[in-house]
Image (tube, rainbow, N blue to C red):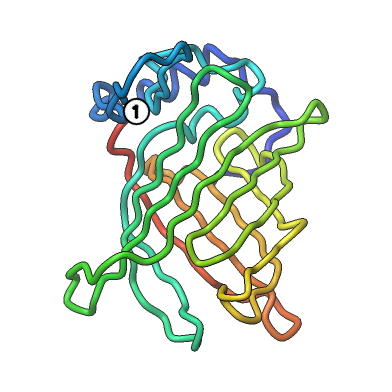
Amino acid sequence: MSENSNEKLNGNDAVNNAAEAWKDAANRNIPAMKLGNNPLPQETANLRQGPSLHDGLLALLPLVGVWQGEGQAHDASGEQYTFGQQLIVSHDGENYLTYSSRTWRIDTEGKPQGADIRESGYWRISLKDEIEMTYTSSNGIVEIFYGEPFNERAWQLESASTMVTETGPKNFGPGKRMYGLMPNNNLGWVDERMVDGEMRPYMSAELERVAG
């Protein structure tokens, strides 16, 4: 992640930069859903296909795509494990991004060991240029994050409301997340959680763009 910058990113420059950085994934997209008549624009994770990205989302433009890779997480007992992740950030021309994450556990030999956590939600930007990110997880967490662009390639968020269902993880505290494009143009992200009065690593991953 690069140094902080207060410069506004020009929309055309952002599109051109993204196009150059991910040529190999340029022709791939999430599959179209054709399950009956629907008058709404098709969801797309490829900025070259489908509806144009809403102008209000230019600060989040580099996130749009399908990303996949591996990371590290800590379970309820504090033990660290490796996971795989597929992250889809898409849009339909409206002023929000759709966010969907699926993870799976990986054993010490690098073999997948079944599904882990799923998250789905939305990214938006307020009229005050504040990022709003909401998500619901398969393990019983509903969370609201607020944040701001760190620069044109990184975004930092902090949880404002964290709710856990009765069957969800115990002692799950508020957290912070940072998403950012690394020098190799992979997407890195880190989630830290409050444990016993201090922020500790919870999940992190490095993902390659595979579509978009």
The type of residue carrying mark 1 is: Gly
Q: Is residue 83 left or right of residue 180?
A: left
Q: Secondary structure at mark 1?
A: loop
* Residue 135 at x, y percent in the picture: 59, 50
Q: Is residue 163 left or right of residue 99?
A: right
Counting the numbered discs, the total is 1
Q: Residue at x 63, y 15 (%)?
A: 55
* Residue 134 at x, y percent in the picture: 64, 47
* Residue 211 at x, y percent in the picture: 30, 32
Is 46 placed above or below 170 here? Answer: above
Mark 1 = which residue? 212
Residue at the outermost right position: 128
Q: Residue at x 50, y 83 (%)?
A: 76
* Residue 104 at x, y percent in the picture: 31, 64
State the image quarter where residue 169 is shown: bottom right
Q: Is residue 107 left or right of residue 208?
A: left
State the image quarter where residue 32 is shown: top left
The C terminus, quarter of image: top left
Q: In the depicted view, which residue is nearer to us: 183 or 190?
A: 190
Q: Residue at x 66, y 33 (%)?
A: 124
